[in-house]
Image (cartoon, grey):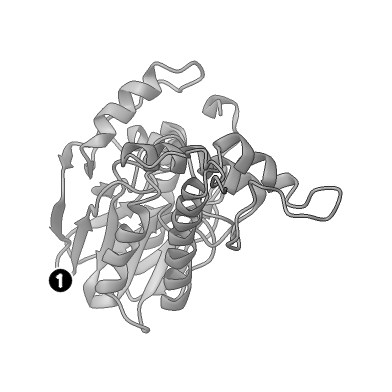
Amino acid sequence: MDSRDVQWTTSTWQPVADDIWVMACEPAGVNIGLVVGSEHVLLVDAGSSPDHGRAIAESARDLVGRPVDRVVITHGHWDHFHGLGGIPGAESYGHEQLLADLEEARSQPGTPAGLVAPTRPFSLVHALDLGGLRVELLHFGPAHTQGDVLVQVPARRVWFTGDLLETSGDPQVGPESTIEKWPMALDGILGGADETSVFVPGHGPVATHLQVFEQRAHISTLYGSAEALVNRGVRLEQALEAIDTPTLPGGSPHPGASEWEWYFSPDTVKAALPLLYAELAGHGQVPRTKLPLITP
């Protein structure tokens, strides 16, 4: 998408817990988090362009009466990352993968000018003291992207998940996703949370512990179903064809149909299957033609 052609908007900050707010912004209905300590004001994600990021930071300052001086980026997609350039005075954090994501973005036509990298990239874990409020930044491995960061506020039992979790629709699968590892990243959330925790997804309303658990299970099922297809000798093109035509005209099931239920939309499954087949091939699992047994 050409982010220069997208009209951005801000909306109204909604409280999530004491000292924590969320605001859904267009384009893409992206959730922006705001966490306020006695010494620092932190944004979680920055919007889709430097102008958008500037407007978001000004809105946060109007709400709390202090400027944003910390920003964390959950991952390198344009609607979360490209606004960072509009908040030049803030110390910023994100996974080191953002450096490569930035170079890739700059090489694409339509990318706005003024994009910047985080000032404090990290690889696995980083902690921030906002003044009486600790924030933990955690990378549990490749999943939605190669550089997803979870933002936890332990004292408030609040998690900002970026696009590892979606409640506005299906989780978004792209070329940089690693579906096999995605459930493990969600396990990192579930292992540190309980039924009282609140989860702010990248897009959509806040989620419950049960919703995180269910989405983790459904993503895991994607991988298991693709593995079953490969083990049956179903080729990728057969599996894709069966998404739209699970039953043949005579009523028999398509030979490429999964025996498991797909929990996501046809478009999501079509986007996921080529990645899943490639991941399985990386483990030496490829469809093999099964010859009939020879009988006397």
Q: Is residue 227 left or right of residue 44?
A: right
Whether residue 238 sits left or right of residue 75 in the image: it is right
Amino acid beneath label 1: Gly
* Residue receiving disc 1: 132
User: Vertical placement of 190 versus 176: above or below?
Assistant: below
Where's residue 169, x and y in %?
59, 57
The image quarter in which residue 237 lies: top right
Residue drawn where x is 77% and y is 52% of the image: 247
Element on which disc 1 rests: loop
Q: Position of residue 253 (x, y in %)?
A: 73, 54
Residues packed near mark 1 inside 10 Å, few (<14), some (14 to 19) or many (20 plus): few
Residue 89 visible here: yes
Percent x, y of residue 129 = 13, 62
- Residue occupying the point 35% across, 78% down: 197
Identify the residue at image location x=60%, y=63%. 261
Give the camera-side residue of 22 and 229: 229
Identified at 45% across, 67% down, the residue is 217
Q: Residue furthest bottom?
A: 196
